[in-house]
Each structure stands twice: as C-alpha cells, then as structure tokens.
Image (cartoon, rainbow, N blue to C red):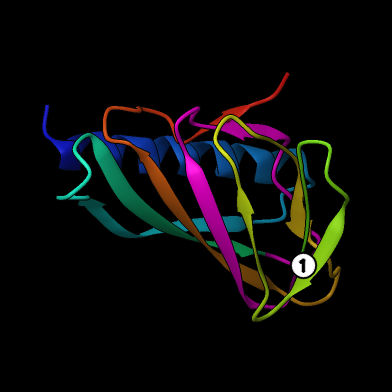
Amino acid sequence: MSIRTLIVAASTAFAVTIAGSALAHGGKAETVTPKFEQAIPNIPGKSLVSLEVEYAPGAASVPHMHAKSAFIYAYVISGEIESKVNDGETRIYKAGESWSEPPNSTHSISRNASKTRPAKLLAVFVVDSDDKALTTPVK
C-alpha cells in the first residue's frame, strides 16, 4: 500500500470522526479538509499531513487521541478555538495563535469558543507513515 493511500485513509478516518462528533453536538457542522500530505524524505518512515478544520458556531469535537506517533502543531486561522490537551489548562486560542500536542496525547476539549461566529484551524501532523488513523475517540 502506498504512503499516499495510507494518508488519504487516515485523513478520511479523521474526517469521519469529526463528522460523527458534529452530529453528537446538535448537528452543528464541522468540516475537515486535507490540505497537504507528503513523506518526509530525510526522515524515513515519517510523513507530514495537514488538515484544515472548520468549526461552525458552537461546534465541538468529541474527546479524542491522535495517532501515538503524531506530533501536532495547531494554528488558529480565524475565530477562537478552546482547547485542552492532557492535564494542561483549558485555553482559548485566537486567530494567529498556536499550540502543539506531543505524541500520545489526549485532546479532551477542542471546540469553537463562539456560539455565533465560525472558527478555523490548521492542524499539522508529523506522524509515522504507516499510522492508519490520525484520530480515535476517547471512550
């Protein structure tokens, strides 16, 4: 199976997880759009994947974990995103602000901080190329 096929499958799994969470929050939509995927040529076995996540007003993701190998950089493009990773503080990030998530993290809060305006973030993953799912809901 090619790296491209694996990353498309992982991106699709992430989108399905996010879409399912939208239904769990009163049908308020969030959209996940794959933006970039590439094996990192000087780091064998690693890939760079970026996704754009758009949250409708009041929308949220279910608590989740990312792939165990994933180091994530998140950048708020517009609006405000409320986030909590592991035992860190719950924080609201505004457009232009960013945070990172170490491998094997739990993302217990990820939501639009506004009930009236949309929000958008870019999530950039450095991940093992053979990881199949970028996101898994926490039960």
Of the pair 59 and 110, the residue shown nearer to us: 110
The residue drawn where x is 48% and y is 31% is 67
Question: Most extreme residue toward the top, as rendered?
Answer: 139
The answer to whether one can see residue 59 in this image is no
As helix, strand or loop, the secondary structure at mark 1 comes to loop
| Residue 17 percent across, percent down from the top left | 55, 36
Relative side of 16 to 98, left or right: left
**Residue 103 location, quadrant:** top right
The answer to whether one can see residue 120 in this image is yes
Question: Most extreme residue toward the left, as rendered?
Answer: 2
Q: Which residue is mark 1?
A: 57
Binning the other alpha carbons within 10 Å of mark 1 as few (below 14), some (14 to 19) or many (20 upward) gives some
| Residue 93 percent across, percent down from the top left | 76, 69
**103 part of magenta stretch:** no
The quarter of the image holding the N terminus is top left
Asked if residue 112 is positioned above or below residue 46 in the image, the reply reads below
| Residue 132 percent across, percent down from the top left | 35, 27
Question: Most extreme residue toward the front, as rendered?
Answer: 42
Of the pair 59 and 99, the residue shown nearer to us: 99
**Region of the chain picked out in magenta, as a range:** 56-80
The residue drawn where x is 36% and y is 36% is 10
The quarter of the image holding the C terminus is top right
**74 part of magenta stretch:** yes
